[in-house]
Image (cartoon, rainbow, N blue to C red):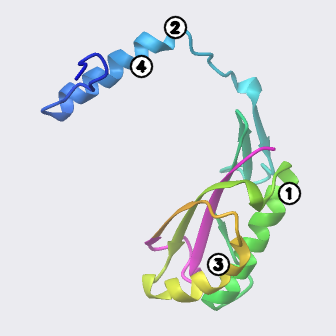
Amino acid sequence: MSHALARPSFTNARALSKHAFSTHHARSSSTTIMSAANIQRLKGDDPRMSQIVIHNGVCYLSGQVGLTTTTVKEQTKETLDKCEALLLEAGTSKENLLTCMVWLKDISDAPAFNSVYNAWVEGAKPTRACVQAPLARESLLVEVQFTAAMP
């Protein structure tokens, strides 16, 4: 067996971190650094954030919530509709989804969320994580955040 292709083994996190740092810097001389001019920020009417950021061929949506509905299914539909509209405004679509992050006020609502989400996402399934978390307002039950490739 050739040792030239073997990956280094690390016995602790410090050694791993040091290796990653040195490997990154060894490669960074040929890396192109993107400037702020390469970043598009859309829908920035909120003083805290942009709703859409596009950088290096990836569209990032801020977390979206449903403010006008009261059940998990209704909030999920409202939220996903908002996300789809933002993706289209950015010039991409749900067919290009890469990742999805879901926050539920109560994780036992996951089946209700999934019943709406599964129909909405269809065949273009992104990677996804779903966690229980307190949300910004008492009335919120669902928050969703996506990243998508730009076509």
User: For residue 88, which numbered disc appears in the image?
Assistant: 1
> Whole-Å distance between the Cαs marked 4 and 2?
9 Å
Q: Position of residue 78 (x, y in %)?
A: 74, 79
Residue 82: x percent and y percent?
78, 69
Mark 3: few/some/many CA within 10 Å (<14, 14-19, 20+): few
Q: Are marks 2 and 1 in contact (CB under 8 Å)?
A: no
Q: Residues within 10 Å of mark 2 (few under 14, many from 20)?
A: few
Identified by mark 4, the residue type is His
Image point (65%, 77%), residue name: 117
* Amino acid bearing label 1: Leu
- Residue extending farthest to the top is 29
Q: Amino acid at mark 3?
A: Asn
Q: Quadrant of the C terminus?
A: top right
For the point 80% across and 59% down, the residue is 86
Q: Is residue 62 visible?
A: no
Say which residue label 4 marks.
24
Question: Residue 118: which numbered mark, if any?
Answer: 3
| Mark earlier in primary sequence (4, 2) | 4
